[in-house]
């Protein structure tokens, strides 16, 4: 049995997770597939910035092929990691306490999935809607679908979603899926417009200031990683939009980037920064990708969103920014900084690919330009 040892060490001023094992081709291949990993001659092992997510990743990668000894990782025990993973799984897939689907229900779900795919719904929407209907039909396993009424839907919301403490966004997703399913698949008499929706929380977007953005980007030594995060911020891209970019989408003559079939199957163009173009040219000199602008370990495969999230986490930790920064924060920051600079909100709507102006107007609540001119009555006392 192969052995892998995990330790927490301080390396170059950072708390890192050290991965050590005897030279073995299979283990070396796995460790080299991890984005952002480096080898330390000082500690004689591979290392990453130490985070809870990194521990999860390493365990998942190595546990099937080796015995992983992490007793030296004092902040975590196996039981704690296992409990955290089970808790996380329950939140994202709340079906553990429900009976299995009936055969007839499985066929109905396949029909619904086929409808979504034919209508060209996005992959994530197809997955989330079909999973939502699975939960709903498992809850009503002993009922015929034709017998389900509005009152049953309300009872499901109250006795399952609310009772188990699932989020309002999950509840809203369930309602969307139910309405579409009964309207398009069942063609039933259920009054779908009477289904209750949860009241949406009015949360403000998280925004980093320009100095924090600069610090994060300066802490990235890998040119590919710096290009990716810089593009998200400089163009306000969603993570999926970045990872779907192909070489032909970069128009260096017109200084535009073409975003194809983004959210809602809408194309759009965004301006290409001269500084980003220079960065991309340096990157392309070293990495001649074949299909996607940013490819993963295998040629022709798009880079993984999970790997990019870990890259950002490591950069944020290295920059010593004590905030739970996500990739979407960079997009929020782009929009807010445009507004701070006086860009019309309608142009920002087009650049972000928002269908409704109301979605874009939320950035007016966090823009410095909107609130800096307000003088507090306290200052006039």
Image: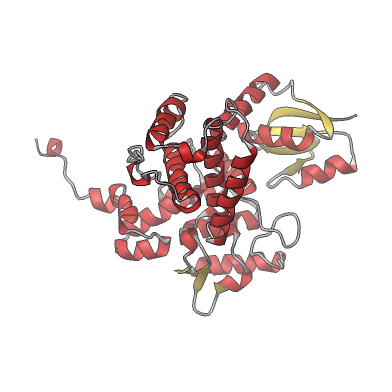
Viewer-proximal residue among 223 and 248? 248
Residue 378 seen in render = yes
Left or right, 117 with reference to 361: right
Figure coloring: secondary structure
Instruction: Specify the quadrant of the image occupied by residue 13.
Output: top right
In this rendering, the count of numbered labels is 0
Viewer-nearest residue: 375 or 28:
28
Foreground pick, 111 / 98: 111
The image shows residue 297, relative to residue 318, as above or below, that is below
Q: Can I make out residue 343 in this image?
A: no
Residue 31 picture location, percent across and down = 78, 42
Q: Quadrant of the C terminus?
A: top left
**Relative side of 110 to 268, left or right:** right
- Image point 16% across, 44% down: which residue? 375
Farthest residue to the bottom: give it. 253
Q: Is residue 76 above or below residue 120?
A: above
Residue at x-position 51% and y-position 70% = 257
The image position of residue 207, as x and y in percent, is 40, 46
Q: Residue at x 73, y 44 (%)?
A: 38
Residue nearest the viewer, comparing 293 with 273: 293
In percent of width and height, residue 380 lies at: 10, 39
Q: Residue 133 in the image: x percent, y percent?
A: 53, 41
As drawn, the residue found furthest toward the left would be 381
Q: Residue at x 54, y 55 (%)?
A: 116
- The N terminus: image quadrant: top right
Which quadrant of the structure image shows residue 379?
top left
Drawn side of residue 30 relative to residue 210, left or right: right
């Amino acid at each position: 049995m192969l052995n892998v040892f995990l330790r927490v060490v301080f390396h170059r001023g950072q708390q890192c997770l050290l991965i050590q094992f005897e030279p073995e081709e299979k283990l070396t291949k796995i460790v080299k597939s991890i984005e952002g990993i480096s080898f330390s001659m000082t500690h004689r092992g591979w290392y990453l910035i130490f985070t809870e997510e990194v521990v999860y990743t390493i365990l998942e990668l190595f546990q099937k092929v080796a015995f992983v000894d992490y007793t030296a990782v004092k902040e975590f025990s196996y039981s704690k990691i296992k409990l955290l993973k089970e808790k996380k799984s329950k939140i994202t897939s709340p079906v553990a306490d429900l009976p299995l689907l009936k055969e007839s229900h499985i066929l109905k779900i396949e029909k619904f999935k086929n409808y979504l795919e034919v209508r060209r719904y996005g992959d994530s929407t197809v997955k989330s809607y079909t999973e939502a209907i699975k939960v709903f039909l498992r809850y009503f396993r002993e009922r015929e679908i034709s017998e389900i009424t509005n009152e049953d839907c309300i009872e499901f919301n109250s006795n399952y979603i609310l009772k188990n403490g699932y989020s309002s966004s999950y509840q809203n997703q369930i309602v969307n899926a139910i309405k579409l399913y009964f309207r398009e698949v069942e063609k039933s008499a259920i009054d779908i417009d009477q289904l209750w929706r949860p009241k949406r929380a009015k949360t403000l977007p998280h925004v980093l200031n320009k100095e924090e953005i600069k610090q994060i980007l300066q802490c990235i030594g890998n040119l590919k990683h710096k290009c990716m995060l810089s593009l998200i911020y400089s163009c306000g891209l969603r993570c999926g939009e970045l990872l779907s970019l192909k070489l032909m989408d970069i128009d260096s003559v017109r200084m535009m980037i073409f975003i194809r079939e983004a959210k809602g199957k809408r194309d759009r163009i965004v301006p290409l920064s001269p500084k980003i173009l220079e960065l991309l040219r340096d990157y392309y000199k070293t990495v001649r990708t074949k299909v996607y602008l940013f490819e993963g370990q295998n040629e022709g495969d798009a880079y993984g969103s999970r790997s990019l999230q870990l890259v950002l986490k490591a950069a944020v930790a290295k920059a010593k920014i004590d905030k739970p920064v996500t990739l979407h924060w960079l997009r929020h920051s782009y929009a807010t900084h445009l507004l701070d600079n006086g860009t019309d909100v309608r142009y920002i709507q087009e650049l972000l690919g928002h269908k409704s102006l109301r979605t874009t107007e939320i950035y007016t609540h966090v823009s410095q330009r909107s609130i800096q001119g307000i003088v507090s009555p306290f200052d006039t006392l």
